[in-house]
């Protein structure tokens, strides 16, 4: 079997469940990953023969894709802020919006300030923590989560970063922060914020495979995590420290009003690349 024949046949199969261009992109990623070849070689050498054992690997991965298992879980990683972040079932797949949040923080703290402490609450795979440790190498970064599965993945990331590796610990964001942790210059969180009523709008591959604990909140308590993490921030932020949230686009005003009531200042609501209310920052 040649590279071209596999791509053509696989794309037809995957196009039965995904739009055609997305299907082709998925298949190309599979070929790049399992054959360990760059994208340009797929086009420059379309008649390249695929070894039988690699055909088996590709077909096995293709079967998983056709079951709507997310590509990132099939590959075992995703690209995030120029880092290769390991993901698996039980750990939320990082989204582009979260990458935007990282870049917003980096832009504000790119002056090389020393002795910065950062806490990532609901860290999941650790993608935010690692990206910030890489972009702000002078920072000491911490991450916490309630999920043991997520913490195992976060602790075992093999990414090479410019700064020190983040320190991860177990914590329930809906309880009091653990004793003994330092004060922070930055607290950032991408907590669960999708209402259960919004699940019907989501893709099957998300609902079937990604952890609901990292996605959903009750409809009657959409600000549950924001309120609790804001209280963490009041206790743990240094004077002048900043809090950053990724939010449900439907609750930008409510989050900003809640932070104002809690005594935060310089509150800013900003949009993501799709012009949806997605980020809130505030200062204590």
Image: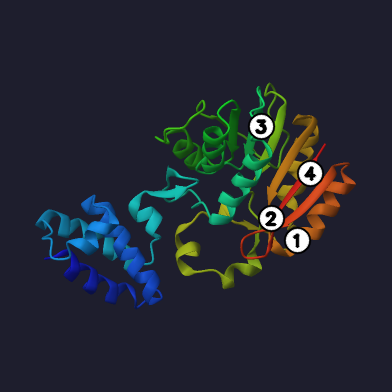
Kindly check if marks 2 and 1 are in contact, taking CB atoms under 8 A apart as contact.
yes
Residue situated in front as seen by the camera: 262 or 161: 161
For residue 111, which numbered disc appears in the image? 3
Label located before the other in sequence (3 or 2):
3
- Whether residue 59 sits left or right of residue 70 in the image: it is left
**Camera sees residue 59:** no
Residue situated in front as seen by the camera: 82 or 242: 82
Q: Secondary structure beneath disc 4? A: strand
Kindly check if marks 4 and 3 are in contact, taking CB atoms under 8 A apart as contact.
no
Neighbourhood count class around disc 1 (C-alpha, 10 Å): few under 14, some 14–19, many 20 upward:
some
Residue situated in front as seen by the camera: 175 or 230: 230
Kindly check if marks 2 and 4 are in contact, taking CB atoms under 8 A apart as contact.
no
Q: Which residue is mark 4?
A: 282
The picture places residue 132, in percent across and down from the top left corner, at 57, 37
Q: Which residue is mark 1?
A: 251
Residue placed at 64% from the left, 64% from the top? 196
> What whole-number distance in Å separates the C-alpha atoms at marks 3 and 1?
32 Å
> What whole-number distance in Å separates the C-alpha atoms at marks 2 and 1?
7 Å
- Whether residue 9 sits left or right of residue 154 in the image: it is left
Circle nearer the viewer, 2 or 4: 4
Label located before the other in sequence (4 or 1):
1
Position of the N terminus by quadrant: bottom left
> What whole-number distance in Å separates the C-alpha atoms at marks 4 and 1?
16 Å
Q: Which residue is mark 2?
A: 247
Neighbourhood count class around disc 3 (C-alpha, 10 Å): few under 14, some 14–19, many 20 upward:
few
């Amino acid at each position: 079997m040649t590279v071209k024949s596999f791509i053509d046949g696989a794309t037809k199969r995957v196009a039965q469940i995904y739009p055609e261009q997305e299907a082709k992109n998925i298949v190309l990623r599979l070929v790049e990953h399992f054959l360990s070849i760059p994208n340009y070689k797929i086009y420059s050498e379309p008649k390249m023969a695929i070894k039988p054992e690699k055909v088996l690997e590709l077909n096995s991965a293709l079967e998983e894709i056709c079951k709507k298992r997310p590509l990132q879980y099939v590959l075992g990683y995703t690209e995030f802020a120029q880092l290769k972040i390991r993901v698996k079932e039980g750990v939320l797949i990082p989204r582009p919006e979260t990458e935007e949040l990282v870049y917003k923080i980096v832009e504000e703290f790119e002056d090389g300030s020393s002795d910065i402490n950062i806490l990532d609450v609901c860290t999941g795979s650790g993608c935010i923590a690692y990206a910030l440790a890489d972009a702000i190498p002078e920072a000491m970064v911490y991450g916490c989560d309630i999920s043991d599965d997520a913490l195992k993945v976060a602790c075992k990331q093999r990414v090479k970063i410019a700064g020190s590796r983040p320190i991860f610990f177990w914590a329930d964001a809906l309880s009091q922060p653990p004793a003994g942790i330092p004060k922070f210059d930055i607290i950032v969180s991408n907590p669960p914020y999708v209402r259960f009523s919004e699940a019907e709008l989501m893709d099957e591959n998300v609902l079937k495979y990604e952890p609901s604990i990292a996605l959903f909140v009750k409809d009657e308590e959409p600000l549950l995590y924001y309120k609790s993490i804001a209280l963490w921030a009041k206790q743990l932020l240094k004077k002048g420290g900043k809090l950053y949230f990724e939010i449900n686009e439907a609750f930008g005003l409510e989050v900003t009003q809640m932070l104002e009531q809690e005594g935060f200042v310089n509150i800013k609501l900003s949009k993501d690349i799709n012009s949806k209310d997605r980020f809130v920052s505030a200062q204590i």
